[in-house]
Image (cartoon, grey):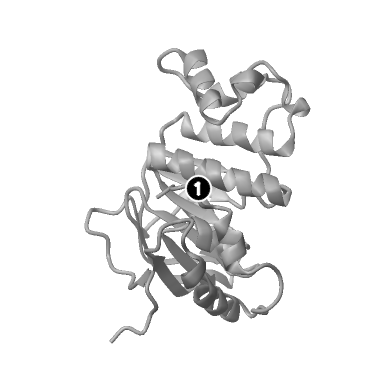
Amino acid sequence: MDARPTGFSRVTAPHSDPVVRLRDFTRSFGDNTIISGLDLDIAPGEFVTLLGRSGSGKTTLLRTLAGLDPTPGQDVIVPDSRAVVFQDARLLPWKKVWRNVALGLRQGDVRQRAEDALREVGLGHRLDAWPLTLSGGEAQRVALARALVREPSLLLLDEPFAALDALTRLRMHELVLSLWTRHRPAVMMVTHDVDEAIALADRVVLLDQGRIVLQERIDAPRGERGQVARALRSRLLGALGGQVSGGPSPAEVIALHAGGLA
C-alpha cells in the first residue's frame, strides 16, 4: 500500500500529450556533466516547481526549456510558444511600461493588448510610467504582463520573487495563481523556497547533481495544505540537506494563500 498521507498521489505519466518532454537528457560543458539522463514531462496546464541546491542543474534545465541552449541530437520537445520571467524584471528603462509589455508584438492592436495585460496584473494606472519609477513588485508585475500577453503554452519562472519583501511576495503568489487559473499555461517555476514550492505547485520536483531525486504531486487544494505540507517539507528539506525545524510553520505560511484558487 502507498503510505503517503491524504493530499499526495504518485507521479504518473500525463493522460494527454505533454507540452514538455525530455528523455535521457544530458548536458555537459567539457568534462563537467551538469544534467545526466534526465526524464521529464510537463502536462498542459500543469504547475511544476523545481527545487535544488546551487549547482544542481536548475538553471541549465530552465535554459533548455526556454530554448536558450541548443539541444542537437537529443530527445527534447518544448512548445514554440513560451515565455520567461526572471528574478530581475529586465525592463528597458528608456521605454514606457506599456512599450515594455508590447516589446516584440506584431499582430493586432499592440497597445491595446499591452494595456489589457497591464490591467490584468493591476497596473492599468501605470501604463505611461517609466520603469525606474516602479517598485520591485510593480516591475515584476510588468514582467508577468509581458510574458502572458503572448499567451504562451509554457511559462518559465526563474525565482521571480526572490528579491521581493515577504508581504509583496505573498501578494505575487496570489497574482500568479490567479493569472495561471485564467490563462492555464504549463508552468515551470524555479525556487529555493520550499514553502513557496509547496504552496503553488501541482507537482514539486527536486533536482540534485543533474538528476530528479524526488517528485511529489500535491492533490490538496491550495490554501488547504497545512496538514500535508509538514511531511512534504520535512522530506524536501531532508533531501536538500537543510534543517526541518525553525521559522514559520508550513500551515502558517500556506494559510496566507487561501482564497479559493485551484
Quick check: 20 left or right of 66? Answer: left
Residue 142 vertical placement versus 219 (above, below): above
Residue 131 placement (x, y as % from top left):
72, 26
Taking depth in this image into account, of 223 and 235 the one nearest to the observer is 223
Image quarter of residue 73:
bottom left
Quick check: 101 left or right of 177? Answer: right
Number of numbered discs: 1
Residue 102 vertical placement versus 161 (above, below): above
Three-letter code for the amino acid on which mark 1 is drawn: Leu
Residue at disc 1, secondary structure: strand
Residue 156 placement (x, y as % from top left):
50, 47
Q: Which residue is mark 1?
A: 156
Which residue occupies 54% across, 74% down?
Answer: 230
Which residue occupies 52% across, 59% down?
Answer: 199
Residue 193 vertical placement versus 257 (above, below): below
Q: Residue furthest right?
A: 133
Image quarter of residue 85:
top right
Q: Quadrant of the N terminus?
A: bottom left
Residue 65 placement (x, y as % from top left):
46, 51
Residue 235 placement (x, y as % from top left):
53, 79
- The reply to whether residue 14 is visible in this rendering is yes
Which residue occupies 43% across, 48% down?
Answer: 260
Label 1 packing within 10 angstroms: few (<14), some (14-19), many (20+): many
Taking depth in this image into account, of 258 and 169 the one nearest to the observer is 258
Q: Residue furthest bottom?
A: 1
Residue 180 vertical placement versus 138 (above, below): below
Which residue occupies 66% across, 78% down?
Answer: 242
